Image (spheres, rainbow, N blue to C red):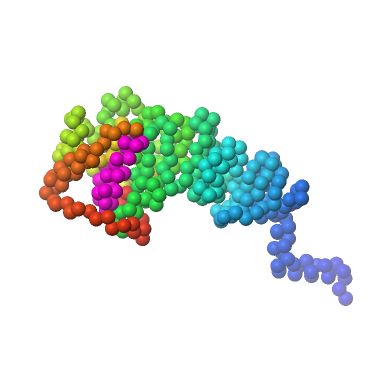
Amino acid sequence: MLSRRDVLGIAAGAALMGPGLLSVQEARAATRINGFTIQGAIYDLWLPNRDLVGTPTTNEYAITGGTKQKFTGALMYTSPQGAAILRGRVRTTFGDGGGVAVLGIPIGVEARRATYATYTQRCTAGRVWWSSADGGKAVPASKTVRLRGARNFRDAAGNGSGLAVAGGRLRRGLVYRSNKLAALSGMDCAILLDLGVTRVIDLRQPATIAASPDRAIAGIARTTIDVFGSTTSSDTYEMYRMFASSAYRRGKIAEAIRTITAATGPVVLHCTYGKDRTGWIVAMIQLALGATESAVIAEWLKSNTYLGTNTLTTGHFAAGLSEAVGATGAAMEPRRDDGDDPSSARSPKAT
């Protein structure tokens, strides 16, 4: 005859082997405070951070792509990527930047770069930064992050889904182009690290670099490639023609492209203003990968907008391109705009 203890033991064993175990786990991964329930992934993150987050003021509720719950000291989100805490100035910046509709759902816990006194929060469709010196910055993944100390900084692959090329699009987040990096702010440095930049390629002459050196960033290597050498010209048309006609400059341009392709992570390519030496090399990469001439020129001319000048004209680019075609002895057929074919992604690193 089974005793009461035996019966309870059998029942407990059955519960451990069946659906009952899930119920026990769910009960442990949940709590109720002030009439509101904290559970699941939010509970798991809230428990070790409850002093930071505070107590709930709502139950968890569904939003596009995940869930959200409000607490006295923070907002908490869940998505397929996990749970996240959003608080303080980062939370304010996230809201001012368009919130979930623009930036997606926050991912992971807010990170801090103590060296630059900067806080950052990844989101499914963008990123948020905040620092006491620079304030807040919320940037959708579809746009290039703007740097306070480098006005012509941008993704060499363009915005959106990337510049259309033969058979696909340029892959964003691999090659960035810029003017000199001498005036970077602390937030700018933190942003470059968050973007994963591993190397800066400086195309300026040694004397120019010595007079205005880039700000050093621990963890980011530097390479200098003097594209101009000892020969310079005050005539912009002649400068662009020499990008193709000068064997020295062609060699340095090829060296810069090889350095980009050999990099182990994202790179920043820059000169003084980021429009001529940098602009020409980026344009050659884009053309080599099959971008249309009109699209390449449109990207090249954006330096006028970023720098607030009108120094670049299509005639400058045409002079260099005409010299390049003449130098190779090849005929260049007009490129057709065949529309966007996103069937595959092409990287500038593939050149």
Residue that appears at 72% across and 62% down = 23
Please say whether residue 204 is visible from this viewpoint.
yes
Residue in view at x 50 percent, y 44 percent: 127
* Quarter location, residue 338: bottom left
- Residue 256 image offset from top left, x and y in percent: 27, 41
Q: Which residues are magenta?
A: 281-307
Q: Residue at x 46, y 38 (%)?
A: 191
Farthest residue, direction top: 211
* Residue at the farthest bottom position: 1
Residue 119 picture location, percent across and down: 54, 37
**Quarter of the figure with the N terminus:** bottom right
In reply to whether residue 291 is colored magenta, the answer given is yes
In the displayed structure image, the side of residue 201 where residue 314 appears, left or right: left
Q: Nearer the viewer, residue 255 or 212?
A: 212
Q: Position of residue 143 (x, y in %)?
A: 42, 45
Q: Can see residue 218?
A: no
User: Where is residue 175 shown, x and y percent of the image?
Assistant: 35, 44
Q: Is residue 60 left or right of residue 142?
A: right
Q: Quarter of the image holding residue 225? A: top left
Query: Is most of the magenta stretch helix, strand or loop?
Result: helix
Using the image as rendered, state which of residue 26 and residue 345 is in the foreground. 345
In the image, what residue occupies the spot 42% across and 35% down?
147
**In the rendered view, does 211 fall on the left or right side of 142?**
left
Total marks placed: 0
Q: Please say whether residue 123 is one of the residues in the magenta stretch.
A: no
Looking at the rendering, which quadrant does residue 298 occupy?
A: top left
